[in-house]
Image: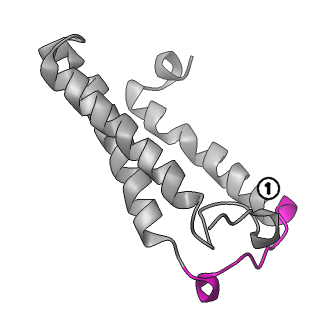
Amino acid sequence: MLTHALNWHWIFFINLPIGLLAIGLGLVLVEENEGAGLRQGVDILGSVLITAAMMLGVYTIVKTGDYGWGSARTLGLGALALAMIAAFGVYESRIENPIGGPPEARMVRR
């Protein structure tokens, strides 16, 4: 309807009122939260590990069109991404300040 009434270029502006509405509602409805903050420490290694694992997993899936699902490259990179996700889970279960959740709700295993 928008493209017929105006021009196809206007599709890029459709997100502007939606975004402004979301920001306005967020300011009104979302309560402030102190959270753990930087004073409690930041899990840099965990953040890097899970980000790299997700990026590698997405890259692997995107490149299956070039190499195929059964290729050694796809299977190897997919296995590496899964191993990184597993390593992330093990690492997060052993540190004091893992990613996510309030500190009092976390269990620390040593």
What span is in magenta? Answer: 28-41
**Residue at x-position 44% and y-position 37%:** 12
Amino acid beneath label 1? Leu
Q: Main secondary structure of the magenta part?
A: loop
In the foreground, 82 or 64: 82
Which residue is the site of mark 1?
25
Q: Residue furthest front?
A: 110
Q: Is residue 47 above or below residue 96?
A: above
**In terms of secondary structure, where does tag 1 sit?**
helix
Q: Quadrant of residue 67?
A: top left
Quarter of the picture containing the C terminus is bottom right
Q: Is residue 66 left or right of residue 85?
A: left
Q: Position of residue 16 (x, y in %)?
A: 57, 47
Q: Is residue 72 above or below residue 98?
A: above
**Residue at x-position 66% and y-position 63%:** 109
Q: Is residue 21 left or right of residue 54?
A: right
Instruction: Say whether residue 3 is visible.
Output: yes
